[in-house]
Amino acid sequence: MVVAIILSGGTGSRIGLDVPKQYINIKNRMLINYSLDAVANCDAIDLFCVVAASLWRDKIETSFSKACKSKFVGFANPGETRQLSIVSGMMLIKDYFDKNGITADTVVIHDAARPNVSAF
């Protein structure tokens, strides 16, 4: 089983906008949605979680495509660093897998603000 962790906890401070860059709208969709759809539509990825602040979770989840809804296992809290955000995502995945008797062979980590990802 392959699981993806989508990192969306960054503040985007360098871009200088009112919202983090992963949440800006491009062609009537948040930037994160392009990354989420790529992951959700990738046959090689079985499940994914999103590391995001609680402030953004409803907005993210209500914008899910049908494919996203079928593979999404939950939200994890962002850490103070990228590495701690990854750990948070890994802990969420571990808890989900332990509760459901699942094991993962591979974990893929992707940044929500990098929408030009393609299937591998």
Image (cartoon, grey):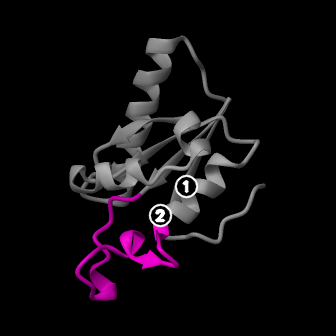
Report whether 118 appears left or right of 82. Answer: right
Residue 81, image x and y in percent? 30, 59
Residue 90, image x and y in percent? 44, 37
**Amino acid on which disc 1 is placed:** Leu
**Amino acid on which disc 2 is placed:** Ile
Q: Front-most of 33 and 94?
A: 33
Q: Residue at 60% of width from left, 55% of height from top? A: 37
Look at the picture and state if 20 lies above or below 51. Answer: below
- Dot 2: within a 10 Å radius of its alpha carbon, few (fewer than 14), some, or many (20 or more) residues? many
The answer to whether the residue labelled 2 contacts the one labelled 1, judged by CB atoms less than 8 Å apart, is yes
Mark 1 highlights which residue? Answer: 36
Q: Residue at 22% of width from left, 81% of height from top? A: 18
Mark 2 highlights which residue? Answer: 32
Question: Which image quarter is the C terminus in?
Answer: bottom right
Residue 54, image x and y in percent? 23, 49
Q: Does the magenta-highlighted stretch encompass residue 11?
A: yes
Report whether 106 appears left or right of 79. Answer: right
Disc 1 element: helix
Q: Does the magenta-highlighted stretch encompass residue 24?
A: yes
How far apart marks 2 and 1 lie (CA) works out to 6 Å
Q: Residue at 32% of width from left, 76% of height from top? A: 12
- Dot 1: within a 10 Å radius of its alpha carbon, few (fewer than 14), some, or many (20 or more) residues? many
Residue 56, image x and y in percent? 28, 56
